[in-house]
């Protein structure tokens, strides 16, 4: 089977082509949005679907976007800093 | 191919070399005569040089009306193109200076730095605050040279890449091309905006009107796209476009709304606010980061391409703002500019009965 390229994902490169990929991945980009790829649905709290309009979406993480839930790059204008996500390879 | 989507109509020549090339293209492929020296001063604003390059490069895109496709690989034309590219490349390198020495790991931070350090003129800020409808139309006419083939120059990169950078470029380009849906293709959204503004929407329709600096920005993309050795610069160029797009496009959309544009007219700009917020992350981390993880020796080229995109865009913006400040059109043949009101569709009213904004 073919897998989505796992370079940014949770699947290690040596598993490429053997591990089953997740249906969707959510990646926190450094000091930026959460990028969502794969098979997902965006909904309002009461369950109505939000049109994602593209296969890969960036969700606002700084809270200041004018197009919530989507990122509009305002995080750069306000100097948003997210800190580093935990390193999955680091010992617990 | 229809006139709407290409081929382009041959523009008028702008000097001795572009005259020779244009005249030759109208005949079957043959060896070109000797041409005058192309190493004059100021290649970025040299109309003859930039139009000559554009005439050569378009043969690799959709071609010219009335021109034999065999010219694309005619050896003497390729030799002339190479002679024109030498001063152009040198001018680009002189414009941006040597890229800072950074490691592949430092590339994302360095790209962030060059794309946010901008002290260039704010065309978007001017248009949002006080640009006139005539000025907005001029801006769109200039940009149409690129946006009616949006994404195409960077697509040249696909067969030259493998691995993570290729996957990232596909992810971005899929969105640029509307995931294969014509009405969502960015080039088609731009065509709709042009139609609302009463501008000629045919591919290449405004080539005669745009000055050398507008052609230079487009030629830089073709230069980077058509030479495999420039693949690092090509990806850096794309990253710079994506990383400096969301916030200005909000301002362009706001400008057009202020001038009376409806949702259909502003859709191109509104789409780019959201799309390029996604593309920025992919371009920075997955595309450029992915490339230098495989080919670390290309790190400096990525930065050069990004810096070239930004510096050429600053020169372009300065040309428009300086022209307008002096009370002039920024286009070469202002007489061809459209006048009149914006076209606005009134909800619920058939298209044939649309009325115009006052």
Image (cartoon, grey):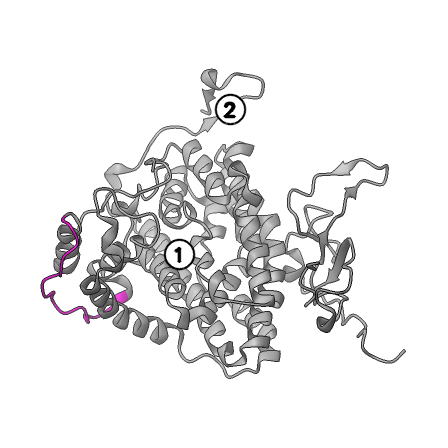
Chain letter belonging to callout 2 = B
In-front residue for pair B239/B41: B239
Q: Is residue A88 visible?
A: yes
Q: Which residues are magenta?
A: B27-43
Question: Which residue is disc 1 drawn over?
Answer: B317
In-front residue for pair A4/B356: A4
Q: Give how far across and how far down residue B328 sits, in percent.
A: 28, 47
In-front residue for pair B87/A26: A26
Chain letter belonging to callout 1 = B
In this picture, residue B276 sits left or right of residue B7: right
Whether labels 2 and 1 belong to a single chain: the reply is yes
Residue ID at (42%, 68%): B308
Front tag of 2 and 1: 2
Q: Give how far across and how far down residue B98 sits, in percent.
A: 42, 80
Marks 2/1 in contact by CB < 8 Å: the verdict is no
Residue ID at (53%, 44%): B269
Circle 1 packing at 10 Å, graded few (<14), some (14-19), many (20+), is many
């Amino acid at each position: 089977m073919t897998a989505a390229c796992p370079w940014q994902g949770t699947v290690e490169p040596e598993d490429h082509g053997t591990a089953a990929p997740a249906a969707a991945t959510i990646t926190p980009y450094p000091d930026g949005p959460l990028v969502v790829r794969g098979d997902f649905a965006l909904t309002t709290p009461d369950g109505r679907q939000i049109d994602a309009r593209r296969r890969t979406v960036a969700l606002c993480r700084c809270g200041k976007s004018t197009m919530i839930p989507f990122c509009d790059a305002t995080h750069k204008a306000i100097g948003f800093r997210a800190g580093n996500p935990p390193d999955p390879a680091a010992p617990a | 191919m229809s006139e709407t989507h290409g081929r382009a109509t041959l523009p008028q020549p702008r000097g001795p070399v572009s005259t020779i090339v244009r005249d030759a293209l109208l005949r079957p492929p043959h060896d070109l005569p000797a041409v005058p020296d192309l190493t004059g001063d100021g290649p970025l604003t040299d109309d003859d040089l930039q139009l000559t390059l554009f005439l050569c490069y378009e043969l690799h895109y959709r071609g010219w009306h009335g021109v034999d496709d065999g010219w694309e690989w005619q050896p003497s034309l390729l030799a002339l193109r190479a002679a024109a590219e030498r001063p152009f490349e040198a001018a680009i390198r002189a414009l941006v200076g040597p890229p800072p020495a950074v490691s592949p790991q430092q590339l994302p931070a360095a790209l962030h730095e060059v794309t946010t350090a901008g002290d260039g003129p704010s065309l978007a800020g001017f248009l949002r605050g006080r640009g006139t409808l005539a000025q907005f139309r001029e801006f769109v006419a200039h940009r149409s040279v690129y946006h009616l083939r949006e994404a195409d120059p960077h697509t040249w990169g696909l067969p030259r890449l493998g691995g993570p950078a290729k996957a990232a470029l596909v992810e971005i380009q899929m969105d640029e091309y509307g995931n294969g849906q014509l009405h969502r293709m960015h080039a088609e959204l731009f065509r709709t905006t042009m139609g609302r503004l009463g501008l000629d929407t045919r591919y290449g329709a405004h080539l005669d009107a745009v000055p050398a600096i507008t052609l230079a920005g487009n030629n830089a993309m073709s230069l980077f796209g058509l030479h495999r050795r420039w693949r690092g610069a090509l990806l850096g160029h794309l990253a710079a476009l994506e990383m400096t797009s969301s916030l200005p496009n909000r301002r362009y959309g706001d400008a057009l709304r202020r001038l009376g544009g409806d949702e259909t007219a502003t859709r191109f700009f509104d789409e780019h606010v959201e799309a390029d917020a996604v593309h920025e992350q992919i371009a920075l981390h997955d595309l450029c980061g992915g490339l230098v993880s495989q080919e670390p020796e290309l790190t400096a080229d990525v930065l050069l391409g990004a810096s070239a995109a930004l510096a050429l865009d600053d020169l372009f913006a300065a040309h428009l703002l300086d022209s307008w400040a002096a009370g002039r059109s920024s286009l070469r043949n202002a007489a061809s500019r459209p006048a009149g009101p914006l076209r606005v569709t009134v909800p619920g009213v058939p298209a044939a009965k649309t009325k115009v904004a006052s």
